[in-house]
Image (tube, rainbow, N blue to C red):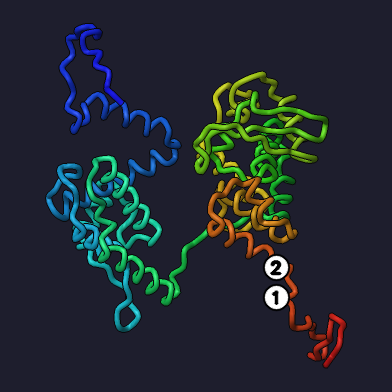
Amino acid sequence: MNVIDITDQLPLVDEMPLDPHVLALNAQEAAAAFIAAGTAANTVRSYRSALAYWSAWLQLRYGQVLGDAPLPPAVAVQFIVDHLARPEAGGSWTHLLPPSIDAALVTARVKAKVGPLAYSTVSHRLAVLAKWHRLKDWDNPGDAPAVKTLLREARKTQTRQGVNVRKKTAIVLEPLQAMLATCTDGVRGVRDRALLLLAWSGGGRRRSEVIGLLVEDLRRLDANTWLYALGATKTDTGGVRREKPLQGPVAQALAAWLAAAPASSGPLFRRLYKGGRVGSAGLSGDQVARIVKRRAALAGLDGDWAAHSLRSGFVTEAGRQGVPLGEVMAMTEHRSVSTVMGYFQAGSLLGSRASQLLPITQEDDGGNSELLTTGDSH
């Protein structure tokens, strides 16, 4: 095909032509604005926190400013051994971060306390560093084989020494019911009951999804059946609205909340002020977490509770009740089977015959064992 030359038809402009190999400054700023706007607020905060830590650590450890140039893999290796504890002979643990630098990081308020960091924290900060390098179009030091090998072996070492990843306590049916029983304190209780039930029954919604719901996202089919629409989420950024069902108690709780706090638009779950006055501003993610913790405390529940407890609890309870994994993932919108399987299997195995092969016995007052289950003895 012949290329049509329309140069003579174009009007003259005052702008200087761009270099196709260099991104203009205003284009860089526009791209950064799109990335920031498309990233959840909690994620932005975690990125800022991680980058602030990298900046402080680099300045104290190397006298280098973050962003001047790409970091070599050796710096990533040093970060790992500085922050991950490893066992020594005699049972003690150590890490290489000098105590003076450790204390300085705490003084600068980029570190909560002196001592090693959790494996998950180190992994997250390396992931943020990787994204930082990608945005700068630099090679990621974390992709170096030496860094990947070190991380993998460090994880194995900590696991063998009994250092496990701590997960938040899952809110399965019984603790959920106990928390709901505390929701008797007026308008606050009406709101919290509706929030807990929607976040749990509606597919184990993330706190960012809960606070992002609008009144206009709801559609009532009948007294016991509502639908709510999800837009962009952490795993689905396409913005296509997907409707999820809300039935029974959660539909009734939503009706009660909207009767107590009428609204035709705006945030579904809003802040409360003295005297039970409902404001117009929506809740923050931190406030959702505080609601979960407060209700757990009022119910006298032991555990490490957080907003994520609702999501993990929904999946665990679905496993307990034998709901097919595909149906669970359709509600939660998990993309990775491996991510959801840990919770799902834990729940499903609780009711599995494979976990109950031995007959259950109970000792009587005389110390003799009494068989509580019946079956063949051979």
The crowd level at tag 1 (other Cα within 10 Å; few <14, some 14-19, many 20+) is few
- State the separation of the CA atoms marked 1 and 2: 7 Å
Above or below residue 289? Residue 11 is: above
Quadrant in which the C terminus is drawn: bottom right
The location of residue 274, given as percent across then percent down, is 60, 26
Q: Is label 1 in a helix, a strand or a loop?
A: helix
Above or below residue 70? Residue 354 is: below
Task: Give the side of residue 173 with respect to residue 310, left or right.
Answer: right
What label sits on residue 178 in the rendered view? Answer: none
Residue 240 lies in what quarter of the image? top right
Which residue lies at the image location 64% right of the left edge and 27% below the top edge?
Answer: 217
Task: Give the side of residue 8 with respect to residue 125, left or right.
Answer: left
Which residue lies at the image location 37% right of the left edge and 29% below the top edge?
Answer: 34
Which residue lies at the image location 33% right of the left edge and 48% below the top edge?
Answer: 128
**Residue 294 in sight here:** no
Q: Is label 2 in a helix, a strand or a loop?
A: helix
Which residue lies at the image location 53% right of the left edge and 32% below the top edge?
Answer: 239
Q: Nearer the viewer, residue 287 or 15?
A: 15
Identify the residue under disc 2: 350
What residue type is disc 2 on? Leu
Above or below residue 325? Residue 262 is: above
Q: Nearer the viewer, residue 162 or 339?
A: 339
Disc 1 to disc 2: CB gap under 8 Å: yes
**Residue 226 in sight here:** yes
What residue type is disc 1 on? Ser
Residue 7 lies in what quarter of the image? top left
Q: Nearer the viewer, residue 141 or 48?
A: 141
Q: Nearer the viewer, residue 200 or 133?
A: 133
Identify the residue under disc 1: 355
